[in-house]
Amino acid sequence: MVGALAKAWLIRTDTGGGYKFLLNPHQIVDEYGAVYDYPEVQGVVYPQPVYKHGDVRKLTVPCRIICPPFDYGALATFTEFVRQAAMPNETGQPPVLWLGVGGLQLPIRIERWRVTYNDWTPELKAKDLEIEITAVVDYWTPVPPPPPVSQPELDRAKAYQQVRSQRRP
């Protein structure tokens, strides 16, 4: 079943670079757990569990990216962006990214990613792929940055401002 396309975005907090893309997820898996301790009690078959701490919250997001006509480099740059976001930075930790899907905005650190290439050009350039991102939610990050704005949107906004300013006396 194919649902409506959602606008989604990923932004790195350390460099500010990001991507805006359309996402058609069949499912987004949001996983969370708790860690319990089972103290030994003599003569008891099943001791009462004692809460120790919460586990990490993980998201698994499948992103299907279809290449615009003759812009095969866009897929390669997005794949490289995800790959770099999973690698540790100078502090030894993976960078924090903001993931926005519809109304969901979460700070994440990518743990694992997987790319599936679905379609190729005759020159063997990928034109349809799926990237599955598994990430841990990072609750130490402050408020989200604004989503990235693509160049055509900026040009359209500037043109609209110029038209409005010309109307005023």
Image (spheres, rainbow, N blue to C red):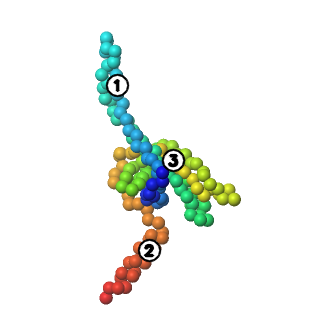
Percent x, y of residue 86: 50, 47
Secondary structure under the numbered disc 3 in the rendered image: strand
Instruction: Report the residue at 55% width, 46% height from top.
Output: 114
Instruction: Report the residue at 47% width, 58% height from top.
Output: 22
Q: Residue furthest bottom?
A: 169
For residue 132, which numbered disc appears in the image?
Answer: 3
Secondary structure under the numbered disc 1 in the rendered image: strand
Q: Quadrant of residue 163?
A: bottom left
Q: Quadrant of residue 52?
A: top left
Q: Amino acid at mark 3?
A: Glu
Mark 3 neighbour class, 10 Å CA radius: few under 14, some 14 to 19, many 20 or more: some
Percent x, y of residue 45: 34, 15
Q: Earlier in the sequence, mark 1 or mark 3?
A: 1
Q: In whole angstroms, how far apart are the C-alphas of marks 2 and 3? A: 32 Å
Percent x, y of residue 14: 44, 54
Q: Amino acid at mark 1?
A: Asp
Q: Amino acid at mark 2?
A: Arg
Residue with the mark numbered 2:
156
Question: On the rendered structure, is 127 left or right of 123?
Answer: left
Q: Earlier in the sequence, mark 1 or mark 2?
A: 1
Question: On the rendered structure, is 93 left or right of 146?
Answer: right
Q: In whole angstroms, how far apart are the C-alphas of marks 1 and 2? A: 58 Å
Mark 1 neighbour class, 10 Å CA radius: few under 14, some 14 to 19, many 20 or more: few
Q: Earlier in the sequence, mark 2 or mark 3?
A: 3
For residue 37, which numbered disc appears in the image?
Answer: 1
Instruction: Report the residue at 40% width, 40% height from top.
Output: 31
Are the residues at dot 2 and dot 3 in contact (C-beta closer than 8 Å)? no
